[in-house]
Amino acid sequence: MAAVTLLSATGITRDFGGLRAVDQVDFELPEGQIRALIGPNGAGKTTFVNLLCGRLAPSAGRIVFAGEDVTRLPAHARIARGMAYTFQITSIFAALSLYDNVALAAQRRLAAGEGLGAAVAAALGRVGLAGRADQTAGDLSYGHQRLLEIAMGLAQRPRLLILDEPTQGLSDAEIEDFIALIRSVARDATILLIEHNMDVVMTLAERITVMDFGAVLAEGTPGEIKADRAVRIAYLGG
Amino acid sequence: MSGATRKGVVLHLGVVALLAGLQFVLPAYHHGNLARVMVLASFALGYNVMFGYTGLLSLGHAMFFAAGLYGMGLAMRHLGLPALPALALGVLCGAALAALVGLLALRTAGVAFMIVTLMFAQTGYLTILYFGAFTRGDEGFVIPRAARRIGALDLSEPTTRYFAALLLLGLCLFATLALVRSSTGRVLIAIRENEDRARMLGYDVFRYKLLAMVISGAMAGAAGAAYGLLFGYVGATFASVQYSIFPLLWVLLGGAGTVLGPLVGTLFMFYLIDLSSGFTSAYMLIAGVALVLLTLFAPRGLMGLVRARLVPWLP
Ligand SMILES: Nc1ncnc2c1ncn2[C@@H]1O[C@H](COP(=O)(O)OP(=O)(O)OP(=O)(O)O)[C@@H](O)[C@H]1O
Ligand SMILES: [Mg+2]
């Protein structure tokens, strides 16, 4: 069965002053896939996904999501169409309770707040933060804030979940749980995962895109990427 | 209704009941003061929706108060509108002006937003002076006693006036309470806390800010219109920059982002000035010192302090 394309980007470019952070990237993501996006620090991964979800405007290029050209749509409209983005630099509502943080993610899709409490409890439960709904988000440890960030992504029930270095700051045990969690989420969502932890990437990803200097250096299955000479030189250290 | 919501409703009903009871025991002087404070507190409640809950600092709120005051007053004076429809028109003027100003000013943020709202308010103030033939400028005009009636109710009569002011305050209090407990209110607070995150959860931040501004403008307009009707005077002072700073101070003192804060702040500052002017002509100095002390020791305002120390569920 040929998978439907959920997201495609053509010629996506973004300049910061004189610096070209993302350079003419063509990218296609089939529905239901777990895709990893890797590359050295400063390769342009975060900038690229920010262009996809509309947090940044592209200098050039075109983005199609679920059959619709979203290039000109503001971020909130893209999110409303089923994208979700979890931030590399934790961005939660630190002064609010965990409940409110996740409720904000969930309530938009629930008519008149119906079943909001259950949806919040479910999302917190899936990341292992059950029973902490009344705590203030800012009081959580860094690792737990990362998990809350993921819970906010899940609570949106997105078609496309973009995770920017989600395992940063998690313990080994938490990373094990994270891998299982993403597998279960992937049953009804497409995943785009930026990740530095190669074990996580090789275990989870069906395909891997490698970026370097703002451009796509290689793309393939985990096996192909491991064998790719250019990738080894640029990223995996030869 | 969740436990916290029920407690919030009971608390605010209690405050309204207390104010209703005070009517029967207060001497005439304080009775009149309190009516005034309740109307001004409604203005502050409107300011709090924007500043305390949504994080939008306006320096031009006098224009929405004045829109209500003049919308009501001019319609009565020149069109002979009865009090009730004139009051409704005042509310509408406040909301409509807020929508218009919001559409333009909300394209900016932070300091630029403060300056733009300040400029709009100055424009409003000067417009009132410029059309002096129509508005009677600085001098203002009186709304005759005979016109200040709704049905059989004489709004210039102290007891009626007190309960009319209390009704307005109660409406604004419970409207705020309902708003901040709703999912819309949760989004407004989210915008105050982290605008980028709120946007990246799919909320049209501009639309929500505009909504907050219209609600705020409607409350300010209602307060302005009620003030003119209850106290019988319409004048340009109420459009001056002073009346843009007052609600900010009241809300800061009472506690931004608490439902009762605006009332507490307005009451506190009114009596601070009233009492200190009783024994010295340098009363603004005393008021100033008290404000500095409060800002140093209770930076979240009086009700913010109460929430932090005593009543964590305070809405
Ligand atoms: N807002 C910005 N203004 C100017 N330059 C920026 C901005 N954001 C990113 N850059 C630059 O663009 C390049 C790509 O950065 P980006 O954050 O996308 O890389 P990354 O692949 O996500 O790196 P990391 O793995 O460290 O997260 C870097 O050189 C960075 O300094
Ligand atoms: Mg990055």
Image (cartoon, helix red, strand yellow):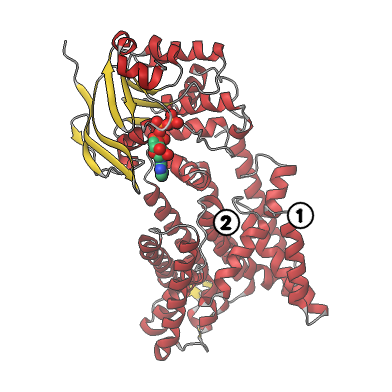
Q: Nearer the viewer, residue B9 or A100?
A: A100
Mark 1 and mark 2: Cα distance apart in space:
30 Å
Q: Residue furthest left?
A: A2
The residue lying furthest to the right in this view is B279
Quadrant of the displayed image that contains ligand 1: top left
Against B92, residue A126 (above or below) is above
Name the image quarter holding the C terminus of chain B: top right
Residue B160 appears in the rendering: no
Residue assigned mark 1: B297
Tell me, yes or no, if residue A4 can be seen here: yes
- Give the residue at mark 2: B170
Task: Look at discs 1 and 2 and give the one toward the viewer.
Answer: 1
On screen, residue A236 versus residue A229, left or right, reads right
Residue drawn at (80%, 78%) of the image: B278
Q: Secondary structure at mark 1?
A: helix
Residue B273 x %, y %: 73, 73
Front residue of B184 and B20: B184
Location of the N terminus of chain B (image quadrant): top right
User: Crowding at label 2, few (<14), some or many (≥20) Cα neighbours within 10 Å?
Assistant: many
> Is the CB atom of the residue marked by disc 1 within 8 angstroms of ligand 1's nearest atom?
no
x, y percent for residue B166: 60, 62
Residue shown at 33%/31% (left/top)? Answer: A83
Instruction: Please identify the quarter of the rendering in which residue A188 is found.
Output: top left
**Looking at the image, which is closer to me, B38 or B266?**
B266
**Pointers 1 and 2 in contact (CB under 8 A)?**
no
Task: Give the structural element (helix, strand or loop) at label 2.
Answer: helix
Question: Against A121, is B114 above or below?
Answer: below
Which badge, 1 or 2, comes first in the chain's sequence?
A: 2
Residue in the picture at 57% in, 77% down: B231
Residue B257 rendering spot, x and y as whole percentages: 59, 50
